[in-house]
Amino acid sequence: MQDILSFKQIKEQLPEYLETIDEELRVTDEEYKTRLEFCFECEGLVFGVTCKYCGCFVQMRALNKHRHCPSPIYKAW
């Protein structure tokens, strides 16, 4: 049987997961904060965790320096 996590559980586990991402793949703390500010104001944010445009967890996507904003409207970063 497959475990299914609720959005609440995902939000609780994200900080621990983010700590495991290699430093070479990360944007600076300042850039991460700026990216998340755009995400948290975006109409495409679902449940405070997921992007409706690509299905990603925004906290994970925003941390990766090789990713960009998937919004077809804003392209914020």
Image (cartoon, rainbow, N blue to C red):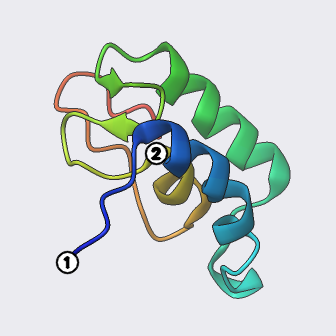
Element at badge 2?
Answer: helix
Left or right: residue 13 compared with residue 62: right
Kind of residue at badge 2: Val
Vertical placement of 32 versus 2: above or below?
A: above
Q: Give the total number of marks visible in the rendering.
A: 2
Of residues 2 and 30, the one drawn nearer to the viewer in this rendering = 2
Vertical placement of 51 versus 23: above or below?
A: above
Q: Residues under labels 2 and 1: Cα distance? A: 27 Å
| Residue, far front | 1
Vertical placement of 17 versus 12: above or below?
A: below
Give the residue at x 61% y 59%. Answer: 63
Left or right: residue 17 compared with residue 29: left
Give the image location of residue 32, x and y in percent: 70, 47
Q: Are marks 2 and 1 in contact (CB under 8 Å)?
A: no
Q: Quadrant of residue 69?
A: top left
Other-residue count near label 2 (Cα within 10 Å), few / some / many at <14 / 14–19 / ≥20? many
Give the image location of residue 35, x and y in percent: 59, 38
Give the residue at x 62% y 56%. Answer: 14
Give the image location of residue 71, x and y in percent: 25, 33
Mark on residue 1?
Answer: 1
Give the image location of residue 48, x and y in percent: 48, 26
Mark on residue 58?
Answer: 2
On the rendered image, what quadrant is the N terminus found in?
bottom left
Give the residue at x 72% y 57%. Answer: 15
Give the residue at x 60% y 35%. Answer: 36
Of residues 14 and 26, the one drawn nearer to the viewer in this rendering = 14
Labels 2 and 1: the sequence-earlier one: 1
Element at badge 1?
Answer: loop
